[in-house]
Amino acid sequence: MLKQLFRTLLLLCAVLSLAACSSDSDAPETQAQTTLNLQLKVVPENIQVKEYKTLTISFKELNTGFTATEVLKNTNSLKKVLPTGTYNITVEGSIIYTDNSVAIEAKVGGVQTSVVINGTEQTKIIDISMKAGSSDLILEEVFFTGTKTPQGAMYFGDQYFKITNNTDKTLYADGMLLIQSAFMTNEKQDYSPNIMGTTFSAGAIIRIPGNGTTYPVLPGASIIIAEDAINHKEFNPSSINLSHANFQIFKEDSDDIDNPAVPKMVNVFEKMVIHTQGYYAYALARMPQGMTNESLISQNSYTYTYNLTFGGDVYPMDGTAVKIPNEWITDAVNLSVQDSFLWLVTSPSLDMGWTSVTSFDGDKNRFGKAVRRKVIGKNAEGKDILKDTNNSTADFEHGVKPSLFN
C-alpha cells in the first residue's frame, strides 16, 4: 500500500512539473533592455561649472507609461538600464558655477522629448540650462481659442492676453515686448543655426507704449491686451466685452478694428496672428535701456534654414526671425495640442514644459477655453499668488473658462 502511494505521489509531481513547464513556455518574453549612458551638458559652454550639486532625472516611456527617477549628486553622468522604448527625459536641479572668481548657485533644467533608446547600449547627451528667475510681469492667462456664435460659427476677435504683476512691488508695463515664436510646437525641423539655448526666435513682436512710468501695474494687478478692444457681445452673445481692455493689437495696413479709447500696441516686427489652437510660444521681454525698435531689428535679425521633407522629396527652406536673448525674457509659455506636440520652441531655462486647451487637433469643444496659471496662495492684500516655476506643464490649468468670462 505504501509503495503504491509513493508511486502515485511521484506521478502527480511529474504531471505538475509538466504543467509548470507548459505554462512557462507560454509566458511572454521579458522586454528588451538597454544600458543608457547619459551625459548632462550645461549650455552655453562658456559657463564654468564648479560643482553639480543635485540633479533629478525623470524618464517616461511614451508607449507603456513606464517611469523612473534618478537623483545625481556631485556628478553629471548616469549609467542606467531601461526598457527599450521612446522616452521623454526631464532634468531639474542646481549647480555652482564661477563668475569672475565668485561662486554662484543656480537652478538648472533640461528636457528632451521622443528620445529613442534601443540596442544593447547607447550614449545620449542632454543639454541643461540655467533657469531664468523672474521678478517682472508674467503671462497669467492666454485666451487664444475664440468662441462660437449661437449659430455655430467660429468667432476669433475676442482673443486676449492677461499679464499680471506677481511680485510685491509696483511695476511698469511701459516698453514690455510681447513676442510670438517663429517656430511652432507641432512642426519640428532641424533649424540652422540652432541658437535656442541662448535666444528666443521671434516671428512677431509687439510692444506696450509709454515713457517708462505711464502704465503702473500694482502688486497682484493685471493688464489685458485684446486682439480687438470692442464689446464682442454685440456681435456674438456668447463672447465678452473687451472695450475696456488696457491695450489693443492693431495692424495698420489691414482691415482691423480700432477703438480710439484704447491705446494701441506698437508693432515692432511682422504681424501677430494668434493661432486658435495654440501651436506657438509666447514670451514677455524687456529691451536694454536706450534700445529702439529699429535697432532691435537691425542688430538681431537673422536668417534660418531647414530642409522640408514632403512626399519623399526634400525642399530647402529659409525664414527670417529676430533673436531675443534669453536674459531679456521675463516669462514664456509654450502652447500646443496634446496629440500634436513635438517639441519646445524655447530653451528649457525659460520654459521646461507646455500647456494646451485640448487633447486633439480640431477639437470643436476648444472654443471658449483658455490656459491660466494656478493660484498657490494670497498676498498680504488678498491678491492671488500665481505659480511660476518656469514649467508650463506644472504652472498652468489647461482648458479652463477664461477669467474675463466670469
Image: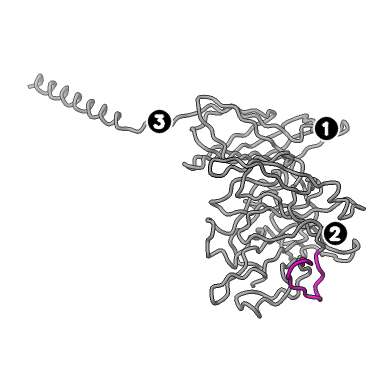
Depth-wise, is mark 1 or mark 3 nearer the camera? Answer: 3
Q: CA distance from mark 3 to mark 2?
A: 60 Å
Indicate whether 327 appears above or below 405. Answer: above
In the figure, residue 396 lies in which quadrant?
A: bottom right
Q: Amino acid at mark 1?
A: Thr
User: Magenta includes 223?
Assistant: no
Q: Nearer the viewer, residue 76 or 178?
A: 178
Residue 175, which numbered label? 2
225 on left or right of 16? right
Could you tell me which residue is drawn at 17 percent across and 22 percent down? 10
Could you tell me which residue is drawn at 81 percent across and 76 percent down? 261
Q: Amino acid at mark 3?
A: Thr
Q: Amino acid at mark 2?
A: Gly
Residue 98, which numbered label? 1
Indicate whether 176 appears above or below 114. Answer: below
Q: Which residues are magenta?
A: 250-265
Indicate whether 244 appears above or below 7. Answer: below
x then y, percent, for residue 22: 25, 29
309 on left or right of 105? left
Discs 1, 3 touching: Cβ within 8 Å: no
x then y, percent, for residue 149: 58, 75
